[in-house]
Amino acid sequence: MKKILVATMVLGIAAAVANAGITVTCYLSATYTVTTGTGVKVVDTYKIKAISDIGNVSAYWAYGKNISDSYPNGGQGMFQVWHDDPNLDDESTFIGWMPTLKTPTMTNAAKITATQRNAETHFLHSDNQYLAATETPDESNNDVFGTIIYGANASRRHFGLSTNSLDLGSDPNKQDLCFLGTVALKTEYMAASMDFLQVGIVDLTPGTAQNWALHVYGEVGVGSNAQRYDYYWIPEPATMALLALGALALLRRRR
């Protein structure tokens, strides 16, 4: 999995982008092992960084979209941890879609364990650091990796993968999203360089071909200037197949 971005860069579908003094990059930050309700999972985390030489980054938005639908239970791509209310004892409340305490920002992510927080997908600011939110950060997942309850009456942790449930109207760029958010930062939290989004991707079956693909895209704003970015995560076996097809196409063209 650590070679995913390298391979996709060869395909030309993921690369650092820069415009008007703003650069956006994506890098593999760490690999974690996380205990879930169905065993230990290996999660690679990627961080998206904005760097500006024309002023401080003042706003950003991001959408996450799954571009594959073959995984059992609807789970694709992004690794998610949800923190549930320990006072709710009816587990049936949380079968399927879970309604409370999602973790699209640091606000609720701070309530899960450090390892879980380090491995999961969320914006890297808290809600109280935003001046405004045009589209309040949100996410969707299933509970394919189950639930762990820490001690008597302790907070539940649900583990899952992103699912396409945030369907926003007829705009194809906003349909079937698993993660979204459009926010402006308060002045004291603006900076010329910042990691603003972390994406956790679980290796569903280590050593075998994966059957998901994930697209994360958005913009970074510095005053009236903005820079668009697009990143794709495609499982390495699928990427190599695409590279092979590209090589065949080149050979055919030469002939």
Image: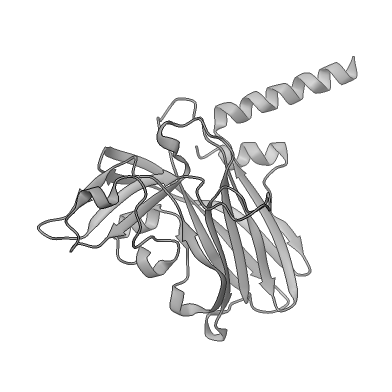
Where is residue 170 drawn, in percent x and y?
Answer: 67, 52
Q: Left or right: where does residue 147 sit relative to residue 24?
A: left
Closer to the camera in the image, 68 or 96: 96
- Farthest residue toward the front? 169
Q: Residue furthest bottom?
A: 188
Rendered view: 204 above or below 227:
above
Residue 66 higher or lower than 69, as above or below:
below
Residue sitting farthest toward the top: 255
Q: Residue at x 30, y 59 (%)?
A: 83
On-image quarter of the C terminus? top right
Q: How many marks?
A: 0
46 horizontally vs 107: left or right: right
Does residue 1 sit above or below 120 in this rendering? above
Picture layout, residue 244 above or below residue 219: above
Residue 177 placed where, x, y %? 55, 50
Q: Residue at x 62, y 40 (%)?
A: 6
Residue 38 position in % (x across, y down): 26, 37
Examine the image and state in which quarter residue 237 appears.
Answer: top right
Residue appearing at x 75%, y 23% in the figure: 247
Q: Quadrant of residue 183?
A: bottom right
Check the image and tell me how it is coloured: one colour
Where residue 163 appears, x then y in whole percent? 47, 45
**In the depicted view, which residue is nearer to us: 62 or 187?**
62
- Name the side, left or right, on which 65 lies relative to 202: right
